[in-house]
Amino acid sequence: MCGIVGIVGKPAREIILSGLKNLEYRGYDSAGIYLNDLAGHEYLTKAVGRIANLEEKLTPDEQGLVGIGHTRWATHGKPTVDNAHPQFDETNRFYLVHNGVIENYRELKDKYLAGVKFKSDTDTEVIVQLISKVARDEKLDAFTAFKKVLKEVRGSYAFLLIDNTEPDHIFIAKNKSPMMLGLGDGFNIIASDALSVLDQTKKFVDLQDGDVADVTKDSYKIETIDGEAVERTPHVLDIDPNAASKGTYEFYMLKEIDEQPGVMRKLSQDYLDVNGEPVLDQKIVDAVSEADRLYIYAAGTSYNAGLVGKEFFEKLTGIPTEVGLASEVGYHFPMLSKKPFFIFLTQSGETADSRVVLKEANKRGIPSLTLTNVQGSTLSREADYTILLEAGPEIAVASTKAYTAQLAVQVILAKAVGEKLGVKAAKDFPLKKQLALAAEGMQQIVDGKAKFDELASDYLIKSRNAFYIGRGIDYAVSLEGALKLKEVSYIQTEGFAAAELKHGTISLIEKGTPVIALINDPVTAELTRGNIREVESRGAHVISIVSHDLAQAGDTVVLPKIDYLMSAFLTVVPAQLLAYFASKNKGLDVDKPRNLAKSVTVE
Amino acid sequence: MCGIVGIVGKPAREIILSGLKNLEYRGYDSAGIYLNDLAGHEYLTKAVGRIANLEEKLTPDEQGLVGIGHTRWATHGKPTVDNAHPQFDETNRFYLVHNGVIENYRELKDKYLAGVKFKSDTDTEVIVQLISKVARDEKLDAFTAFKKVLKEVRGSYAFLLIDNTEPDHIFIAKNKSPMMLGLGDGFNIIASDALSVLDQTKKFVDLQDGDVADVTKDSYKIETIDGEAVERTPHVLDIDPNAASKGTYEFYMLKEIDEQPGVMRKLSQDYLDVNGEPVLDQKIVDAVSEADRLYIYAAGTSYNAGLVGKEFFEKLTGIPTEVGLASEVGYHFPMLSKKPFFIFLTQSGETADSRVVLKEANKRGIPSLTLTNVQGSTLSREADYTILLEAGPEIAVASTKAYTAQLAVQVILAKAVGEKLGVKAAKDFPLKKQLALAAEGMQQIVDGKAKFDELASDYLIKSRNAFYIGRGIDYAVSLEGALKLKEVSYIQTEGFAAAELKHGTISLIEKGTPVIALINDPVTAELTRGNIREVESRGAHVISIVSHDLAQAGDTVVLPKIDYLMSAFLTVVPAQLLAYFASKNKGLDVDKPRNLAKSVTVE
């Protein structure tokens, strides 16, 4: 994934460091910075771990008027100083930062760079060495050599390149990985994510796949790899850079869990009118209504939200709905119905796995909709339609409010489509009231968060493993609960259809193994209670999270009242809180679990 | 699940114990036996754990001419002597063994048995106490009281009841749980599974749901709960009772892994003619060909086999295929196409979760096919069609050869249907040759099993967790590999679509975490290698299992040559062997992992 910031025309160091800190959600295995003062001095510094480590290593004299910086999520080679970016060539002339994965780096290395000694295990070093070799052997300037090399490169990349023989230029190339060019007065700035440099400018050019650019402090030129000029219109981003402040919270994750009732109210206000009727772009509702089958594609937490979405769409629109892992269908397309409609769920709008599917869908002319939290993101631009999640910036790596916003937007869309199709279940569904119940219920649960602090300490933090079980919608939430708990607490947790545990996995139940059982479905509640008794018979400690109407004496958590179809809105909040407190009480960095990155822009 | 044996008219003890040992695959938490010598002496003995423990507790004088025995897989209450069966009433008159789950036992207890003191936590004791109370209060004989109580019972059961005031009778009731009545000369025997008592008789009556029976040594009478007489025709089972011997193997699991090449050859011989054309009941091929969508339902390992089957059916027949967890659709039926066809995968043919789906399918008139290893099993009888897996008895709880037999039968059926529909991919597919390659390749892998013994010892047995990753068919096999490893070795293992790991779960990767990567799909091989580098960067120890054509220097295991579509046949064998050796080298009981039962007849 990796985050990149580059600037030319202004004292560069603090701007790059501040931008990289904002980008740490894209990975934080290691970081590095190259600075050049345009007076013959250059500085390269790299460090393992957070940006703070890099900052500590920098001496006061390391300054520059041009520079590039990088925070890394390792794809090739371990997180070491040698593998950190910028990478450079053996003549110490070119400096390159890279986000993405070069698929044919081995071939390129074997074919062209037999005699070159490599310092790192990265695919990136192969590219910078090759640029250097081509420039040297063929006596080409940096931009020409760069484009020549790119013609042979297969894979995903956002590159920033500096040539110290013409250090007042930054060269850019983009394919599949995001890269924005920010325009300033007497300077220009380049970043993986416009949000990270909003304090410098709000005017941006969105670079597109296949673009290369040559940027100086007061000019920029965009071309194709073949050297043809390209026009890209700048636009102004209207976002409050302070919306993402942590305030008095120790961690963003808890802040974002707490914000969920507010997000529900905002979505209800923005997407429903006073009568509770959905207010969505009519073209979107029409397009979905014409489909004979819906295909939801996503990854990770968004995939789990899609599983709940399937219930909304099938119950309220009567259109059969399939949910798939984007990475699994990207290269093996599903057998489609006659009138398919694709829905992409992606918080960042940059998920590479989903983008592969969308590109193929576009090629085939399949209509598509992206539900995303980021206006102007790649999947938003490339799909036919977009509905924004309006969850506000989500900084913690583990997604919480974006998940519940995905649920809300899906159920609103399902109601709109169902009403257009004349489906009784949609007409009868009191969505505004139910969303209000969701907001109130979430508020009750977060107000009682101390209980989950205790449960996490008493039953989770000392366990090597845990299970979530449930049936129907509770099964979908079990998958999300398990993902949340394991990604932030490192307790290996699996979500299971309640009945499936006994087909093998029940052998892992020992005395005290935590099993979190979700019961909201009246039809299968008794069966799930049977599954609870099975694991209790084998010594499990069961934490039962049960709907208001199905609660019995002895249940651990009784949820506020809501319709079964909407139950995921409430059930997931205890799961989020258990994950949060398990991580916090183990003394872990809740917001930035090891190995992870928030926006996953590699496949 | 539980296993039951009862006999009347012959010295009962050794016959019951031998039958129960054969039934240990149905659960082995605890066991018990009731014996009555018809001369005023009765004996009740129960023990926690295996039948061997029960045997040790029996004294030489405990003998009988009638008796009932039980081996238990706990559903209510811990495995203790008090919770073991037979359960008995407070007057010590009735003795009851039970397989199944009574859903309304609490209601019955609260309503009728307020004053009764209970010795166990079981649902079963409620029933035996209630029979006793009804017989006493209303002065009814045992059979009449039994039927009266059954009218109020909701749930699944196979019951055997003895009343010591008329001890030469055994009373039976059956609903959803299997029960066979074996007919002998001067004796009758009743068992959960005919195979367990084949040394006593081969003549059986299959009892059906709703049947009750009154059995003496030379008579039996079958009725409905309402007392109407029922006719059931006996049939003769033609099975070799010695086929299941372990021979020189330490564990059945390894024997069954080793038998797979033979099973492949047998299936090829029995279901393909000399020209390689499928030889299946034409009615089955016709029925499947008429479907516009196939729905495969299963649980556990069979579900994993269904995921591979989807690939066979879609590639070779062009019919879209959905795979679902039986337990998830049983009570929330899927949105069906116009011409659905249901396929059930169940090794035992008794899986309760699948049976719920089949009953609903029958009610709706949806045509259905069961692929099972057990002729005459419940799901075989109740579906429109059956194809037998012909894998021979599988005794180890972890399924191996039944899984590969399920793959084989599915691909044979897919080819037959595809050919009938004129699909080119089916006509061109050289199935006989590919199945021969599967058999040869499996043989090569099992011949080299020492390698997996080493890998398991070096990398798996000390790890708390492990991962399988793969894309496409490799993803389906990853799920099966993970299930196999965790169920017998208790190492928490998850199977992942290779690209999904980075959407959260990669935070669990630490130094030395074993990640087993499967690479057989040429289209996505390079992407999966990218995912390997991601986990290696974070310290994982990767065991790569790679197809002949995609192998690179450094791969751990290179598989023999086979078509990608058939790759699961070979990829799964290393996974089975790794699981086997991980369990064996940890000193565990490979064939009988804790908490499990082979045939899962509760929901």
Image (cartoon, coloured by chain):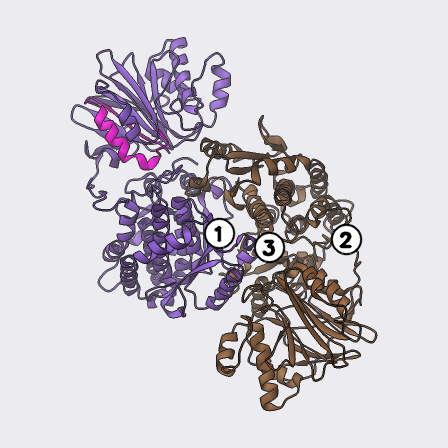
Chain colours: A purple, B brown
Q: In x, y percent, where is residue A102?
A: 44, 27
Instruction: Magenta stretch: give its range.
Output: A1-30
* B19 horizontally vs B157: left or right: right
Neighbour tally class for label 3: few under 14, some 14-19, many 20 plus, Cα within 10 Å: many
Badge 2 sits on which subunit?
A: B
Tag 3: residue type?
Arg
Q: Residues within 10 Å of mark 2 (few under 14, many from 20)?
A: few
Q: Residue at x 61, y 53 (%)?
A: B593
Q: Could you tell me which residue is drawn at 83 percent across and 74 percent down?
A: B185
Left or right of B54: which side holds B118? left
Question: Mark 2: which secondary structure?
Answer: loop
Task: List the residue tagged with mark 1.
Answer: A337
- Residue B482 to residue A171: above or below: below
Residue holding disc 2: B245
Q: Is residue A291 visible?
A: no
Q: Amino acid at mark 1?
A: Ser
Label 1 Cα neighbours within 10 Å, binned few <14 / some 14-19 / many ≥20: few
Q: For this rendering, which residue is in front, A152 or B263?
A: B263
In which quadrant of the rendered view does residue A80 lie? top left
Mark closer to the observer (3, 1): 3
> Both on one chain, marks 2 and 1?
no
Callout 3: helix, strand or loop? loop
Q: Toward the viewer: A421 or B432?
A: B432
